[in-house]
Amino acid sequence: MLAVWRVRRYYSGMWYTYIIECDNGQLYTGITTDVERRWREHCQGKAGARFFRTSAPRKLCRVEPYQDRSSASKREAAIKKLSRPQKLKLLSSDSPLPVPALSPACRAQ
């Protein structure tokens, strides 16, 4: 697992679009300014998206940086419109930023 300071070095001060794979195989796309914090929120199930009430996050698959919230939101919307095969093709390409090896989901279903 990457050290916290190293994750923040890559992922601070900008907006990010990210894709998470869940335990049930579904893909979740979201935006944030802090990838590590958002991962923890999704894992804990408190401040995370309702999407994760049915299946815990398994793996952070892709992170894309953007200068502002508007750009990140537009990319999020574009990714959400993709079909599953298109999303899997996107995931098979390299992520624009290194994807940190964050700890797996910590809550029980």
Image (cartoon, rainbow, N blue to C red):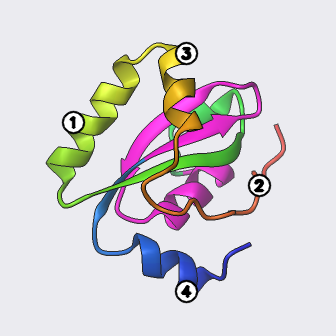
> Disc 4 and disc 2: Cα gap in Å?
18 Å
Mark 2 — residue? 104
Dot 3 or dot 4: first in sequence order is 4
Q: Which mark is residue 5?
A: 4
At 18% from the left and 46% from the top, the residue drawn is: 71
Q: Nearer the viewer, residue 23 or 81?
A: 81
Mark 3 — residue? 85
> Disc 3 and disc 4: Cα gap in Å?
35 Å
- Tag 2 and tag 1, C-beta contact below 8 Å: no
Which secondary structure, mark 2? loop
x and y percent of residue 104 in the render? 77, 54
Q: Residue furthest right?
A: 108
Q: Classify 86 as above or below 76.
A: above
> Disc 3 and disc 1: Cα gap in Å?
20 Å
Of badges 3 and 2, nearer the viewer stands 3
Which secondary structure, mark 4? helix
Q: Is residue 18 left or right of residue 15?
A: right
Say if the magenta span includes residue 30: yes
At 59% from the left and 45% from the top, the residue drawn is: 61
Q: Quadrant of residue 34?
A: bottom left
Say if the magenta span includes residue 23: yes
The amino acid marked with disc number 3 is Pro
Q: Residue furthest bottom?
A: 5
Dot 4 or dot 1: first in sequence order is 4
- Tag 3 and tag 2, C-beta contact below 8 Å: no
x and y percent of residue 108 in the render? 84, 44
> Disc 4 and disc 1: Cα gap in Å?
29 Å
Mark 1 — residue? 74
Of badges 3 and 1, nearer the viewer stands 3
Which secondary structure, mark 3? helix
